Image: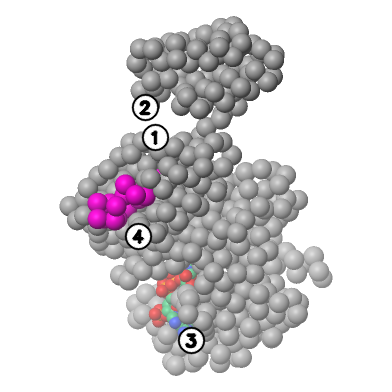
């Protein structure tokens, strides 16, 4: 199976690394041989329909910062659209940065791939939170697969888990901690009694929070994920703009200590239930499934037959996120095998 | 018929007699009473388990009368009658008149504010207050929506339970 990867940051590199680590195992286990035929970043592309050397690709990016410096097959300034037109690929892996204004250019990349009858796997929340219906319909019309497990909760299984493992159930509501960075900040505030500003600064130094932390701390990232869950698991037709969002930047050590005295913690929770679609700081009981520390994500799905089912996992990280992307690719491969 | 009640009494003399008075006046029998003064709730009140006997109308009347006399009935035959709802407001608690917010919370039907804690931050905007309400069971969702409305109308950040 030939893969085209748009975006070569933490996740893109994680995917290449994971393929390099596990391709032999995939051949053995599933008879699946993954080849990366194109990779892009802001410098251009590396493209070879025979397949790129994965370690050389990582090394080139590591040392020069540009995939377009890849020996022989690097093309400076080649656009994503040119790559999509020229690469011979089966599955697009779209891992460019999330844009929550209009979901572009990811939306266009994905639609373009669908029209060329290619399957798509993405971790990019932007178009999923803004254009879910359009993308989904296009995938159906073009009879291709569209998977996005990595977009919510990184390595925490939730979308495919609900669709496949809980396929007998209807899901009534979902409550979850869907952002690792804010959970890390709140956990440390609770442990150390320090101020939000202090812990944010330290998290930035540790690389856990970004230099511009707004997407995480203002709840935007969690809101996108809440929308993705609402649309893909509860059959809603909602968009990012429908979410009532409150972030964590106003949480004080005083409020955390008042909560603690009662045996509670403050966590940033995304909720889809009834007519509620919101992300906000909430009180959760110490010792309850939501009392997870560090960058962990957790979600409880309330179902009709199985009652409450809770999943926990690493919400981010290159290899963790790559694990979800590769699982999507493998399940697409299995679907294709069955349909042969 | 018999009914098992759990009452929640203040730890002061005379509370138990006050609770018994309407029971016998209305013609119900007291079958058992378990009163352990050393077992206390987190708020320092004393739970009293009591079994009463009588016909249904009498027992209903007893419950209504006890509640109208502000005697807290926590459980009837193992079913919780009241539940606690906790919330935290963050913001300038003093300037934005948290007392008025508490009053409005108290006015929600079936709701009573039972605990209030305040922590003033170095920056008054960052003060926090914890409020515990006691509410009739089964109304949590609606009440949480009202708490949010009231808190937000005062400009507070409202942190409700999940
Ligand atoms: N990091 C995680 O753990 C995680 C988890 C779940 C989901 N996600 C999502 O996955 C996506 C990728 O995340 P990331 O952490 O890998 O981001 P990142 O480290 O910022 O990397 C983004 C990559 O995309 C490239 N890029 C930017 N604009 C581009 C364009 N127009 N065309 C082609 N390439 C472009 C960048 O190029 P340069 O290298 O030249 O700058 C960079 O290589 C995002 O949508 C994110 O929300 C991330």
User: In the picture, which quadrant includes the N terminus of chain B?
Assistant: top right
| Chain ID at mark 2 | B
Q: Is residue A312 visible?
A: no
Q: Is the CB atom of the residue marked by disc 1 within 8 angstroms of ligand 1's nearest atom?
A: no
Q: Of tags 3 and 2, which is closer to the observer?
A: 2
Measure how far apart labels 1 and 4 are at the Cα level: 23 Å
Give the residue number, with chain letter if any, for mark 4: B155
Q: Position of residue A309 (x, y in %)?
A: 61, 45
Residue B43, disc: 2
Magenta region: B87-101
Q: Is the CB atom of the residue marked by disc 3 within 8 angstroms of ligand 1's nearest atom?
A: no
Q: Of tags 4 and 3, which is closer to the observer?
A: 4
Q: Nearer the viewer, residue A13 or B100?
A: B100
Q: Position of residue B120 (x, y in %)?
A: 22, 47
At horizontal 56% and vertical 36% (from top left) the residue drawn is: B137
Q: Of tags 1 and 3, which is closer to the observer?
A: 1
Give the residue number, with chain letter if any, for mark 3: A45
Number of residues whose C-alpha sits closer than 10 Å to that of mark 3, classed few (under 14), some (14–19) or many (20 or more): many
Q: Position of residue A67 (x, y in %)?
A: 43, 82
At horizontal 48% and vertical 76% (from top left) the residue drawn is: A100
């Amino acid at each position: 199976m030939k893969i085209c990867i748009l975006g070569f940051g933490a996740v893109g590199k994680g995917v290449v690394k994971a393929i390099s680590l596990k391709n032999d195992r995939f051949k053995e286990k599933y008879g699946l041989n993954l080849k990366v035929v194109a990779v892009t970043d802001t410098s251009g592309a590396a493209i070879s329909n025979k397949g790129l050397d994965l370690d050389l690709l990582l090394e080139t990016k590591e040392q020069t910062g540009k995939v377009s410096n890849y020996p022989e097959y690097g093309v400076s300034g080649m656009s994503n659209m040119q790559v999509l037109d020229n690469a011979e690929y089966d599955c697009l892996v779209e891992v460019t940065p999330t844009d929550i204004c209009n979901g572009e250019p990811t939306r266009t990349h994905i639609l373009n791939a669908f029209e060329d009858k290619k399957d798509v796997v993405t971790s990019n929340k932007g178009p999923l939170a803004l254009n879910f219906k359009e993308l989904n319909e296009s995938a159906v019309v073009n009879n291709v697969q569209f998977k996005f497990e990595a977009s919510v909760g990184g390595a925490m299984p939730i979308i495919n888990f609900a669709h496949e493992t809980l396929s007998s159930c209807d899901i009534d509501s979902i409550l979850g901690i869907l952002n690792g960075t804010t959970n890390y900040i709140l956990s440390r505030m609770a442990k150390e009694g320090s101020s939000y500003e202090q812990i944010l600064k330290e998290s930035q130094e540790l690389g856990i929070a970004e230099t511009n932390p707004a997407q995480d701390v203002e709840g935007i990232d969690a809101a996108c994920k809440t929308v993705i869950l609402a649309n893909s698991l509860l059959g809603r037709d909602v968009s990012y703009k429908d979410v009532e969002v409150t972030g964590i930047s106003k949480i004080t050590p005083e409020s955390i200590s008042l909560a603690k005295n009662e045996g509670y913690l403050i966590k940033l929770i995304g909720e889809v239930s009834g007519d509620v679609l919101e992300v906000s700081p909430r009180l959760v009981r110490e010792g309850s499934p939501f009392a997870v520390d560090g960058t962990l994500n957790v979600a409880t799905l309330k179902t009709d037959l199985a009652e409450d089912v809770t999943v926990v996992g690493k919400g981010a990280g290159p290899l963790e996120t790559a694990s979800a992307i590769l699982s999507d690719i493998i399940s697409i491969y299995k679907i294709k095998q069955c349909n042969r | 018929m018999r009914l098992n009640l759990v009452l929640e009494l203040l730890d002061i003399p005379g509370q138990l007699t006050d609770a018994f008075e309407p029971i016998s006046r209305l013609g119900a029998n007291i079958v058992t009473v378990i009163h352990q003064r050393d077992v206390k709730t987190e708020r320092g009140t004393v739970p009293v388990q009591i079994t009463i006997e009588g016909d249904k109308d009498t027992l209903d009347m007893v419950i209504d009368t006890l509640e109208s006399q502000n005697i807290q009935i926590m459980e009837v035959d193992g079913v919780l009658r009241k539940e606690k709802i906790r919330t935290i407001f963050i913001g300038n608690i003093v300037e934005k008149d948290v007392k008025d917010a508490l009053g409005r919370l108290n006015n929600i039907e079936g709701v009573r504010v039972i605990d209030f804690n305040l922590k003033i931050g170095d920056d008054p905007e960052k003060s926090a207050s914890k409020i515990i309400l006691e509410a009739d069971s089964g109304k949590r969702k609606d009440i949480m929506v009202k708490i949010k409305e009231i808190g937000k109308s005062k400009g507070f950040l409202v942190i409700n339970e999940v």
